[in-house]
Image (tube, helix red, strand yellow):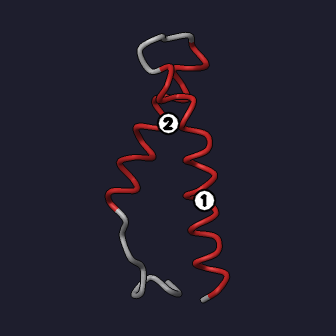
Amino acid sequence: MVGMKNKKLYKGVDIFKLIAAFGVVAINTGVDFFNILGRLGVPFFVMISSFFFFKYYFN
């Protein structure tokens, strides 16, 4: 595979993405416990996606 030997793993980012995904699902299903976390999930996904996009773009 092309570029797989230089792939860096971001385990912390993956964990936060999982937590944010649960929060977004909780917001859409009406679970009150993850209300604040869910509201932060969407901006977090935008920031992380743009980080990886521009990292790839500038390399």
Q: Up-down: is 43 above or below 30?
A: below
What is the quadrant of the C terminus in the image? bottom right
Residue position marked by numbered label 1 in the rendering: 49
Disc 2 residue type? Answer: Ala
Decide which of tag 2 and tag 1 comes sooner along the chain.
Answer: 2
Residue position marked by numbered label 2 in the rendering: 21
Disc 2 from disc 1: Cα separation: 13 Å
For mark 2, give the secondary structure: helix
CA neighbours of label 2 inside 10 A, class few (<14), some (14 to 19), many (20+): some
What residue is at 58 percent from the left and 48 percent from the top? 45
For mark 1, give the secondary structure: helix
Instruction: Report x, y in % for residue 23.
Output: 48, 28
Instruction: Report x, y in % for residue 5.
Output: 39, 87
Q: Up-down: is 16 above or below 21?
A: below
What residue is at 45 percent from the left and 30 percent from the top? 22
CA neighbours of label 1 inside 10 A, class few (<14), some (14 to 19), many (20+): few
Disc 1 residue type? Answer: Ser
Drawn side of residue 42 relative to residue 6, left or right: right
Q: Up-down: is 39 above or below 43?
A: above
Drawn side of residue 58 relative to residue 21, left or right: right
Instruction: Report x, y in % for residue 16.
Output: 40, 46
Instruction: Report x, y in % for residue 24.
Output: 55, 29
Drawn side of residue 10 relative to residue 55, left or right: left
Q: Up-down: is 5 above or below 48?
A: below
Drawn side of residue 14 relative to residue 54, left or right: left
Observer-nearest residue: 18 or 47? Answer: 47
